[in-house]
Amino acid sequence: MRIFRGALAAVAVLGSVVAPEAGAEPQFPDLDGFTAVDAEGYRTYSAYMTTGWQFATPGGVLCRIQKNSRAGFASLACWGAFPGVAGGESSIELDKASAPSAPVFAKSDRQGYGYKNLGLPGKDDLIPLAKKDYPVLAPGQKIVAAGAGAATTCAVGDGGLTVCQMEKAASDNEDGWRHGFVLSPEGSWTF
């Protein structure tokens, strides 16, 4: 009986050493394991110093990356039926102005509309989505939008996984930061 208790105690101690810590931060997927697509195939609009790339996931989530080369602005927004969220949230946004805060999931009515046509007198109406403007990013692929502002990378994995991150390197004038999100049926989260 002593041997059994000793073995049980050893297993309990060993189990506490090798078991993952409860509530540990999930790991962001390694983006190096995804194949980069030619971003030009996803560039769907360009306006004065602003370029945009748009894509859809096989599960129907729509995403837009924007860069403004003059202002150094970068933004990322995704919306749709998100897997792994409990409260019905359907949108998430991240931009250089909001960093270094992690993005927050929100409820949105963007499902039928892409964006507001702001800046022109009398033209602040919602513009309907055109699904053809959102080429599908297939599982195993990633899109990288570098250049002005923060570098933005989004990737699609198997089983409904979508991951995006925006990263700004440190400079003499500004601290660096990295934020993003994971959409997954096993649980969606931000960082």
Image: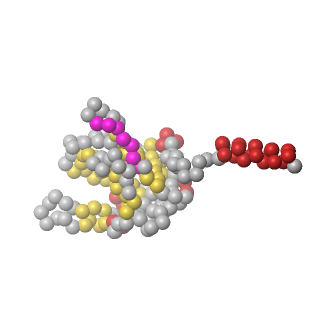
Q: Residue at x 54, y 49 (%)?
A: 24
Q: Residue at x 51, y 48 (%)?
A: 25
Is 133 located above or below residue 178 in the figure?
below
Is 164 located above or below residue 81 in the figure?
above
Coordinates of residue 114 in the picture (x, y in percent): 31, 62
Q: Residue furthest right?
A: 1
Whether residue 179 appears in magenta in the rendering, the answer is yes
Q: Residue at x 37, y 45 (%)?
A: 166
Is residue 145 among what the camera can see? no
Coordinates of residue 168 in the picture (x, y in percent): 34, 40
Residue stretch in magenta: 174-180
Whether residue 1 appears in magenta in the rendering, the answer is no
Coordinates of residue 48 in the picture (x, y in percent): 19, 48
Horizontal relation, residue 22 to residue 62: left or right: right
In terms of depth relative to the viewer, which is nearer, 163 or 190? 190
In terms of depth relative to the viewer, which is nearer, 81 or 137? 81
Q: Residue at x 80, y 44 (%)?
A: 6
Q: Residue furthest left?
A: 121
Using the rendered view, name the quadrant where residue 129 is placed.
bottom left
Horizontal relation, residue 86 to residue 152: left or right: right
Is 163 located above or below residue 110 in the figure?
above
Is residue 120 among what the camera can see? yes
Using the rendered view, name the quadrant where residue 178 is placed.
top left
Identify the colour scheme used: secondary structure
Coordinates of residue 177 in the picture (x, y in percent): 36, 41
Q: Residue furthest front?
A: 2
Q: Residue furthest top?
A: 172
